[in-house]
Image: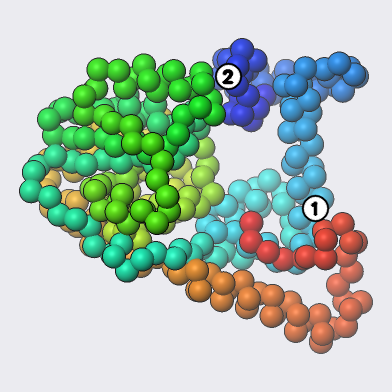
């Protein structure tokens, strides 16, 4: 039920999210609902989804045990796989690469003292846009501006929450989406990107894009975000879901004019697609050589994985 709460909309999603807030209830209730739901031919859609989700982890354990090398983009992702007893023969960490235009290397300076904050992402509860909007009234409206990029419509109930929180905030604007070719231009107009996620992100490309454009990131101190964002070096971290802490981190950027420059200078170079591909090709080459040296009998796998025994997660 806790997992299902993230993906279920409408009236069903509302009560599921309420139940999921109390940790012990979904743990006790989920097995009962799955058992009774499995016996019903006319089960509701959310019950069918609950049953499918209950089968996901066992399926992943079985399927990924057939993999020779599993490539994870961050140390946190690799650690979560291990904690959840995902046991391929080997797990390696190899970060994603990006193809960015050379113009993305330099941000556009601006003369005013307004902090230009950006959010780029899906409008859904787990992405935490509402946390950022809750933080905005805690900041001086004449010193900060928020530009939101993304498209509503996937989760109407959450869209209503976002609109309610943004109502009356004249320093908040909704910019819609943009083609990938404009990434450099968008980031050039931002001082900082905020990633207020409420879940363990894998390796968000928007964070890598921000770094490629030399834009610091303020992110939830959780999961792979904490792997990528180093507090005080290339960005700032705040307690997940805590609008007060997020506001305090943004306030520190306004109070110390040198902090933003230090964070900008601390952003490392982002891996290219060619570097990422070289890692993956190296893994394939090693597996091919090992197979040739040991003979085809050295590795026996059923044909259920479409002939592919390694690849990025």
Neighbours of disc 2 within 10 Å: few (<14), some (14-19), many (20+): many
Task: Kindly tell me whether residue 303 is visible in this rendering.
Answer: yes
Q: Position of residue 30 (x, y in %)?
A: 73, 22
In this rendering, would 271 be left or right of 93? Answer: left
Q: Position of residue 5 (x, y in %)?
A: 61, 24
- Cα gap from disc 2 to disc 1, whole angstroms: 30 Å
Quarter of the image where the N terminus is located: top right
Location of mark 2 (residue): 17
Label placed on residue 63 = 1
Q: Secondary structure at mark 2?
A: helix
Q: Viewer-proximal residue, 11 or 300? A: 11
In this rendering, would 26 be left or right of 240? Answer: right
Q: Position of residue 164 (x, y in %)?
A: 36, 16
Residue at 36% across / 53% down in the picture? Answer: 182
Q: Viewer-proximal residue, 94 or 303? A: 303
Residue at 45% across / 23% down in the picture? Answer: 159
Residue at 46% across / 29% down in the picture? Answer: 152
In this rendering, would 237 be left or right of 92? Answer: left
């Amino acid at each position: 039920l806790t997992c299902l709460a993230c993906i279920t909309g409408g009236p069903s999603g509302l009560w599921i999210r309420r139940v999921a807030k109390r940790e012990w209830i979904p743990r006790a209730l989920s097995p009962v609902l799955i058992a009774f739901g499995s016996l019903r031919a006319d089960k509701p859609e959310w019950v069918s989804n609950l049953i499918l989700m209950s089968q996901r982890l066992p399926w992943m354990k079985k399927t990924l045990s057939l993999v020779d090398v599993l490539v994870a983009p961050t140390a946190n992702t690799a650690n979560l796989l291990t904690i959840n007893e995902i046991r391929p023969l080997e797990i390696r960490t190899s970060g994603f690469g990006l193809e960015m235009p050379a113009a993305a290397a330099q941000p556009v300076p601006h003369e005013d003292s307004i902090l230009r904050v950006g959010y780029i992402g899906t409008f859904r509860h787990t992405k935490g846009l509402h946390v950022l909007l809750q933080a905005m009234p805690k900041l001086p409206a004449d010193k900060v501006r928020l530009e939101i990029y993304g498209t509503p419509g996937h989760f109407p109930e959450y869209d209503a929450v976002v609109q309610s929180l943004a109502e009356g905030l004249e320093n908040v604007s909704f910019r819609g989406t943009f083609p990938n070719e404009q990434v450099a231009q968008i980031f050039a107009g931002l001082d900082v990107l905020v990633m207020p996620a409420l879940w363990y992100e894998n390796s968000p490309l928007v964070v890598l894009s921000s770094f490629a454009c030399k834009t610091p990131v303020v992110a939830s101190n959780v999961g792979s975000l904490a792997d990528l964002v180093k507090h005080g070096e290339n960005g700032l971290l705040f307690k997940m879901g805590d609008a007060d802490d997020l506001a305090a981190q943004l306030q520190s950027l306004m109070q110390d004019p040198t902090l933003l420059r230090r964070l900008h200078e601390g952003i490392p170079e982002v891996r290219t697609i060619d570097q990422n591909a070289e890692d993956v090709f190296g893994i394939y080459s090693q597996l091919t050589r090992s197979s040739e040296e040991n003979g085809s009998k050295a590795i026996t796998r059923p044909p259920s994985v479409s002939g592919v025994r390694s690849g990025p997660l």
